Image (cartoon, helix red, strand yellow):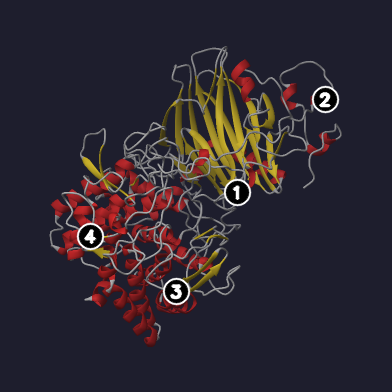
């Protein structure tokens, strides 16, 4: 687009006034002299924000025929998502769910001799603005309270989006007993999902930033007292605020140069209960963006919040919660009276794209964001992995939200490899490793569990009468048969960097995307996928393939122990007898001494030394009984806390409320996907892996272990009220304890091992990714399983076929 030229004549074209400078001077100066371009392009190197979110949000929108669409009846679909970390508003997305538009938005307070930013160390609490009498959230609207450690002021922020516009609405309420304090607001735009290439300017209506045809504006219900734009770390105005408690230079634009820009505005003097309402709005033109903000501010705080919440006749989050019929009975199996359950339902729904309905992402975060470069666009976890996707779709089924589950299933066609997949020169039928929500390829490894799970989901949807016979038959021909054929025949994966012959059940990557070979968790999904495919093929009149799928599943099943259950294990502990499931092996002899590949900075180990919980998936799906010998023999090793720390998987946690000890598990021994235990630095900080990197405890394994306990109790016919209470107070409550103050469940939590550079509390979510959709989904499914007294992901057709 045409860049801004610094000439006085451009004042009219750009709608600029000397608003910022004019408000700090009464001199009758020449306006042209006050039009100043900020120096210092491109500004500081950009990085993403902290990934441990304590809140996320977006407006709840309603499907029309399984899709989101603008209409006269429902108005525009709001496509704005926000996140909160360390008390600050962080990455806020507009358009597609991965398209971040800002890094952060923070407030600043100055006094006579001090300046405090929200990025400083304030005391922060977070709560929900709209709750029921039991304290359960009814919407994803937040109240964040930040208090100066010296007691000079407090700031309360109310954060939500406007369902009718593309606007983030922020109310800030300041309280202070001191005189002479001023409040400011600062926004660091990352337009179009990167931290460079942006322009910014001041206008009479407010602040504007843009890149190409992506615009954002910041407006206030009361005119800014002063405003400036500049380049982050160079001319952003924050340095002068910190040193002089005033904006020394006011720049009206960033000139011809683009970069990492910054917008700063003075809100005004503060005292007790001083309130400012702000609109951060988005559009594809400056006019659109401005209009969205103006409309939201004109409606006002209460009207926008009521609509967001779903009060009265307006459709909002409360309507979604009330539509979830199983919630009432499920609450009885929670240990917190349903608080995390209500939150999880909304968090899962909030992590769906609204342009591509049904596109369920892994997390609204960029892992270890503040040390990850934002020079170029990155989806982080704001993308589709079919495995995570399956977990979330099954959680929607558990909640009774069959509409979202069905729309999600139908979306999967977009991420299956076919003859039209860009760059594909190989075989078809398998599902892509990781894609953008619009289907754009990102990672292209073959993970056979991700090819099996859409078949399993289809079977579940049909059994629940969500997919009719005719719909299932149609999907069998379009999507499910090609997937099942690939699970039987394998084929050549030849796309982008990948040029690999796949021979099932050996997978190119297992569920941790790091190793090839024979994996218990992957094989469990393959066997379940083929048996459900056989059942679907029979319904579709394809008896020949029904028989082929079933025979292949039985063959794979018969080889599980010989390929993956070692009887000559070499783990050293009093609790191991040398017989257990390994994580993965790259040959077909479970007793061989082959090494698995080095990964994430960790050297490769003998495969018999590496445990993980993947064997529990065999029980979950019905491939093995809970009391089968190979399963029971593996439990002591899996639960062994006396193993060498690097090989240990289970860790016990005690929390401040003194209500007990709870189990947590790492992905596997020798995991390197986490903070460095020697230096305390983030994962791959500086762009390279380090030998000391150590994967931490992942809370959803607590749910997986709880699911096994349900299956085991059923197998021994002991799932009575006492046993239910025991599982609820051990595994359900354990997951609840891992949630942060905003009730977001993390990917990983601090396990107390190594240098703690970030100062994490034991059991606190690290900076990997929070909230993780898979963790919330596992919690929802565990509660539903306990409520039903049956594992939710269990496939009776699988168990029956393998008897």
The numbered mark, 1 or 3, whose residue comes first in the sequence reads: 1
Marks 3 and 2 sit apart, C-alpha to C-alpha, by 67 Å
Dot 1 or dot 4: first in sequence order is: 1
Q: CA distance from mark 1 to mark 2?
A: 38 Å
- Mark toward the viewer: 3 or 2: 3
Query: In front: mark 4 or mark 3?
Result: 4
Q: Position of residue 609 (x, y in %)?
A: 28, 54
The residue that mark 3 highlights is 483
Q: Is residue 285 left or right of residue 446?
A: right
Residue at mark 4: 580
Q: Earlier in the sequence, mark 4 or mark 3?
A: 3
Q: Residues within 10 Å of mark 2 (few under 14, many from 20)?
A: few
Kindly indicate the quadrant of the structure image that contains residue 68.
bottom right
Can residue 534 be seen here? The reply is: yes
Gap in angstroms between the C-alphas marked 1 and 3: 31 Å
Frontmost of labels 2 and 4 is 4
Q: Left or right? Give the position of 520 relative to 60.
A: left
CB under 8 Å between discs 1 and 3:
no
Residue occupying the far front of the picture: 593
Q: Secondary structure at mark 2?
A: helix
At mark 1, the secondary structure is loop
- Rendering coords of residue 314 (x, y %): 50, 49
User: Pointer 1 and pointer 4: residues touching (CB < 8 Å)?
Assistant: no
Q: Residues within 10 Å of mark 4 (few under 14, many from 20)?
A: many
Which residue is drawn at the image coordinates 34% and 51% (left, top)? 667
From the viewer's perspective, tell me whether residue 505 is left or right of residue 645: right
Residue 377 badge: 1
* Numbered disc 4: secondary structure: strand
In the image shown, does 586 or 267 lie closer to the viewer? 586
The quarter of the picture where the C terminus appears is bottom left
Quick one: label 2 or label 4, which is nearer the N terminus?
A: 2
């Amino acid at each position: 687009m045409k860049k801004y030229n610094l000439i006085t004549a451009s004042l009219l074209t750009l709608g600029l006034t000397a608003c910022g400078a004019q408000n700090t001077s009464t001199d009758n100066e020449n306006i042209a002299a006050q039009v100043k371009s900020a120096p210092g392009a491109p500004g500081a190197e950009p990085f993403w924000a902290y990934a441990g979110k304590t809140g996320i949000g977006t407006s709840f929108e309603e499907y029309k025929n399984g899709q989101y669409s603008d209409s006269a009846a429902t108005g525009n679909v709001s496509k704005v998502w926000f996140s909160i970390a360390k008390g600050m508003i962080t990455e806020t997305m507009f358009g597609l769910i991965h398209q971040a538009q800002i890094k952060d938005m923070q407030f600043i307070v100055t006094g006579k001799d001090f300046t405090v930013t929200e990025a400083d160390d304030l005391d922060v609490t977070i709560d929900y603005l709209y709750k029921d009498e039991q304290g359960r959230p009814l919407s994803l609207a937040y109240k964040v309270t930040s208090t100066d450690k010296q007691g000079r002021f407090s700031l309360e922020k109310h954060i939500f989006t406007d369902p009718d516009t593309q606007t983030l609405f922020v109310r800030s309420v300041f309280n202070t007993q001191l005189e002479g304090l001023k409040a400011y607001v600062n926004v660091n735009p990352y337009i179009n999902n990167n931290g460079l290439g942006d322009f910014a300017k001041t206008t009479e209506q407010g602040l504007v930033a843009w890149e190409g045809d992506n615009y954002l504006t910041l407006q206030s219900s009361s005119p800014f007292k002063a405003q400036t734009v500049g380049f982050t770390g160079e001319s952003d105005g924050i340095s002068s605020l910190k040193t002089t408690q005033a904006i020394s230079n006011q720049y009206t634009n960033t000139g011809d140069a683009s970069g990492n820009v910054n917008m700063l505005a003075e809100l005004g003097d503060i005292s007790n209960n001083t309130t400012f309402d702000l609109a951060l709005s988005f559009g594809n033109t400056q006019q659109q963006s401005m209009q969205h903000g103006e409309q939201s501010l004109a409606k006002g705080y209460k009207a926008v919040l009521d609509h967001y919440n779903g009060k009265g006749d307006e459709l909002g989050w409360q309507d979604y919660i009330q539509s979830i019929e199983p919630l009432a009975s499920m609450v009885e199996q929670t240990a917190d009276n349903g608080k995390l359950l209500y939150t999880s339902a909304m968090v899962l729904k909030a992590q769906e794209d609204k342009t591509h309905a049904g596109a369920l992402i892994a997390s609204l975060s960029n892992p270890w964001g503040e040390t990850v470069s934002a020079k170029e666009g990155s989806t982080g976890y704001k993308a589709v992995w079919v495995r995570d996707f399956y977990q979330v779709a099954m959680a929607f089924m558990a909640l009774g939200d069959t509409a979202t589950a069905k729309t999600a299933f139908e979306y999967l066609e977009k991420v299956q490899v076919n003859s039209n997949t860009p760059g594909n020169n190989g075989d078809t039928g398998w599902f892509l490793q990781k894609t953008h929500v619009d289907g754009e390829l990102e990672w292209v490894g073959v993970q056979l569990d991700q090819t099996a799970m859409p078949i399993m989901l289809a079977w579940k949807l049909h059994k629940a009468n969500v997919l009719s016979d005719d719909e299932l038959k149609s999907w069998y021909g379009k999507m499910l048969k090609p997937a099942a054929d690939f699970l039987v025949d394998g084929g050549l994966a030849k796309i982008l960097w990948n040029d690999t012959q796949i021979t099932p059940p050996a997978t190119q990557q297992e569920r941790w995307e790091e190793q090839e070979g024979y994996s218990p968790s992957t094989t469990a999904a393959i066997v379940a996928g083929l048996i459900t495919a056989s059942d679907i093929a029979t319904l579709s009149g394809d008896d020949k393939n029904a028989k082929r799928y079933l025979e292949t599943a039985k063959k794979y099943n018969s080889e599980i122990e010989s390929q993956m259950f070692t009887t000559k294990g070499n783990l050293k502990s009093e609790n191991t007898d040398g017989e257990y499931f390994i994580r993965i092996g790259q040959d077909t002899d479970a007793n061989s001494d082959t090494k698995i590949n080095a990964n994430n900075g960790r050297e490769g180990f003998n495969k018999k030394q590496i445990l993980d919980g993947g064997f529990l998936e065999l029980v979950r799906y019905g491939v093995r009984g809970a009391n089968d010998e190979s399963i029971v023999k593996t439990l002591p090793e899996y639960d062994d806390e006396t193993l060498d720390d690097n090989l240990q998987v289970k860790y016990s946690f005690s929390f401040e409320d003194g209500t007990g000890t709870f189990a947590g598990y790492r992905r596997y021994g020798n995991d390197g996907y986490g903070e460095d235990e020697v230096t305390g630095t983030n994962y791959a900080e500086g762009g390279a892996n380090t030998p000391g990197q150590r994967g931490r405890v992942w809370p959803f394994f607590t749910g997986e272990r709880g699911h096994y306990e349900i299956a085991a109790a059923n197998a021994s016919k002991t799932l009575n009220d006492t046993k239910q209470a025991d599982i609820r107070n051990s595994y359900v409550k354990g997951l609840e304890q891992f949630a942060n103050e905003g009730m977001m469940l993390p990917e990983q939590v601090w396990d107390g091992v190594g240098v703690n550079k970030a100062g994490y509390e034991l059991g606190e979510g690290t900076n990997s990714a929070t909230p993780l959709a898979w963790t919330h989904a596992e919690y929802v499914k565990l509660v539903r399983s306990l409520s039903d007294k049956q594992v939710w992901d269990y496939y009776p057709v699988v168990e029956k076929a393998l008897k």
